[in-house]
Every structure is written in structure tokens, then in C-alpha cells.
Image (spheres, rainbow, N blue to C red):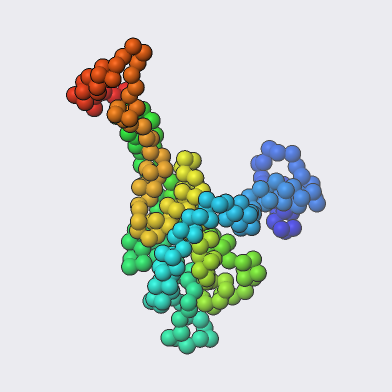
């Protein structure tokens, strides 16, 4: 950092032509760190996520509701060692009961027996409504999920003490997730995937990603359901009341007339 800061401050070979005021040595080091490095540095938000999103009752309820299905999926997936990497000091036929990063990335990127749809990519859809001709249906939603986000969520879902700067062997704590950590990883990816759609709540985002993984709903279906505009139907038999001066017989005549009305083509 010191060398780079000094080279940047070199009037001939550094930021040559920069019209900003010259930062003399050694102030250039502080300026580079404060103005250039820290604002662009990635900040560890894994703890914040656990204290906020993972503490919401609605999110916890979603994870609890899908726990049996996810646990069955997790056991079946980790039992399949075709995408697992082998640790350097272990036997070739030794498999892990935890989910390894290589296998998880393969599942997210390529549809296969463990997931029949792409979990990463770019999606878009229009809003839908019960109201014919609703102008709000012109709203176009776009959202995405990248492999880089998948990797980051995988690493952030592990306990901080397992992220030591050591060489990963493929089956150590750095490269695997147990089931509880996998639940957190799904929650992180749900939030990341549907973050661009403001109408999707955290619980709906987490549930949506789990449904994508289990092939219960597509990404489009998740967003359409969360943003759908519902119109309360008028139930004439239950909600119609006699006006002042009207008899029950008058109400029955009105109901008979109402049943014959065709208003399906009336729209905004």
C-alpha cells in the first residue's frame, strides 16, 4: 500500500494529468486509503444478516415449514458424490455428509437431477392483475443471481472461525456446509436473488428460492404471485342489502337482474 501510494503521488508516472490538488508525501497514503480503498472495500455483513433477516419470525417460519423437505433434499444430494471433490489425504471412495461448494455451484448453474431449473441467471416479467386493462400491468420487473453471489453466500453462511486463511482440501470446514448452514445459505440467496423486486418481502424471497430449488415454482411465478394485483369480487347474494323503502321482493328482483348482466368486457 505504501509503495502504491507513493507511486500514485509521483507527478510524472503516477496519476499524471490529475487536476486534483497534489497530496504530498506521506499524506498521499492516508488519502488513498480513506478516499479510494475503504469506500470500495468489501465489508463483512454476514453477522448483520444473522442479526436481522435470520431473526425475523416470518423468515424463521418459512425455514421451519420447509425444513423436512429441505432436509430430505440435503441428505439425497450429499449422498451423491459424483460432484464432490476428494480431500487430499482421504480415500477416494470416502464421501462427505456435508454439501461441498463444487457440488452446490454445479447444482445452481446447471439443471440436473437435484434441481430441474437454473438457480442463477437473469429474469424479467410484467406485473399481472385481476383488472382488465390495469395500467399497473405495464410495470416490468428485472432481477438476477450470479455465481459470484452464490459463492459469497456459501462462504458467509459458515461460522467466522471456519474462514481462516488456509488451503482448502475440498472437504474441510472452509468448503462445506452442514444442514443448518445450508438453510442460512438458502435464505441469503433468496434475499440476493429477489432484492431488485421491492414488493417481494424477505420471507417471500426466502420461500421463493426454496421453491425454485425444490422445483415447486419458477422464478417468474414467485415474482408474479408476490406482485399480483387482486380485485375483491362482489358477492351479490351475501353483500346486497335493501335500500331505504325497498322490500325483500325488490332486492330479489335486483339480484335476478344482476345475474343477467355481462360486465366482463368493462375495463379501465
Image location of residue 85, percent across then percent down: 46, 77
Q: Which residue sits furthest left?
A: 260
Q: Which of 138 and 64 is in front in this view?
A: 64
**Horizontally, is 219 left or right of 54 in the view?**
left
Question: Within the image, what quadrant is residue 69 found in?
Answer: bottom left
Residue 125, horizontal then vertical, whole percent: 36, 42
Residue 131 visible to the viewer = no
Q: What residue appears at the point 35 percent right and 47 percent down from the top-left corner?
A: 221
**Vertical arrangement, residue 173 with respect to residue 153, above or below:** below
| Vertical relation: 175 (above or below) 91 | above
**Height in image: 98 above or below 183?**
below
Considering every residue shown, the one lying at the far top of the view is: 245
Is 88 on the left or on the right of 14, as rendered? left
Q: Position of residue 146 (x, y in %)?
A: 46, 55
Residue at (33, 61) in percent of width and height: 116
Looking at the rendered image, the quarter that the C terminus falls into is top left
| Count of numbered circles in the view | 0
Image point (57%, 51%), residue name: 56
The residue shown at (43%, 57%) is 210
Q: Report the front residue among 164 and 183.
A: 183
> Relative to residue 135, is residue 184 depicted above or below?
below
Q: Nearer the viewer, residue 160 or 79?
A: 79
**Quadrant showing the N terminus:** bottom right
Amino acid at each position: 500500500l505504501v509503495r502504491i501510494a507513493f507511486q500514485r503521488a509521483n507527478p510524472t508516472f503516477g496519476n499524471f494529468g490529475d487536476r486534483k490538488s497534489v497530496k504530498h508525501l506521506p499524506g498521499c497514503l492516508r488519502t488513498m486509503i480513506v478516499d479510494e480503498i475503504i469506500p470500495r472495500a468489501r465489508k463483512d455483513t454476514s453477522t448483520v444478516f444473522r442479526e436481522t433477516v435470520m431473526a425475523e419470525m416470518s423468515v424463521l417460519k418459512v425455514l421451519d415449514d420447509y425444513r423436512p423437505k429441505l432436509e430430505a433434499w440435503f441428505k439425497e444430494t450429499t449422498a451423491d458424490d459424483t460432484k464432490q471433490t476428494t480431500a487430499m489425504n482421504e480415500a477416494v471412495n470416502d464421501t462427505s455428509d456435508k454439501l461441498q461448494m463444487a457440488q452446490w455451484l454445479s447444482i445452481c448453474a446447471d439443471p440436473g437431477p437435484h434441481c430441474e431449473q437454473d438457480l442463477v441467471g437473469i429474469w424479467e416479467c410484467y406485473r399481472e392483475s385481476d383488472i382488465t386493462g390495469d395500467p399497473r400491468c405495464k410495470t416490468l420487473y428485472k432481477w438476477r443471481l450470479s455465481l459470484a453471489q452464490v459463492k459469497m453466500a456459501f462462504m458467509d453462511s459458515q461460522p467466522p472461525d471456519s474462514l481462516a486463511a488456509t488451503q482448502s482440501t475440498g472437504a474441510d470446514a472452509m468448503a462445506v456446509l452442514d444442514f443448518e448452514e445450508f438453510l442460512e445459505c438458502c435464505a441469503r440467496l433468496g434475499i440476493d436473488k429477489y432484492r431488485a423486486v421491492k414488493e417481494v418481502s424477505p420471507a417471500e424471497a426466502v420461500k421463493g428460492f426454496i421453491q425454485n430449488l425444490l422445483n415447486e415454482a419458477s422464478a417468474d411465478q414467485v415474482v408474479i404471485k408476490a406482485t399480483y394485483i387482486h380485485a375483491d369480487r362482489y358477492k351479490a347474494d351475501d353483500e346486497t342489502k335493501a335500500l331505504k323503502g325497498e322490500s325483500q321482493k325488490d332486492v330479489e328482483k335486483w339480484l335476478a337482474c344482476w345475474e343477467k348482466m355481462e360486465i366482463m368486457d368493462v375495463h379501465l
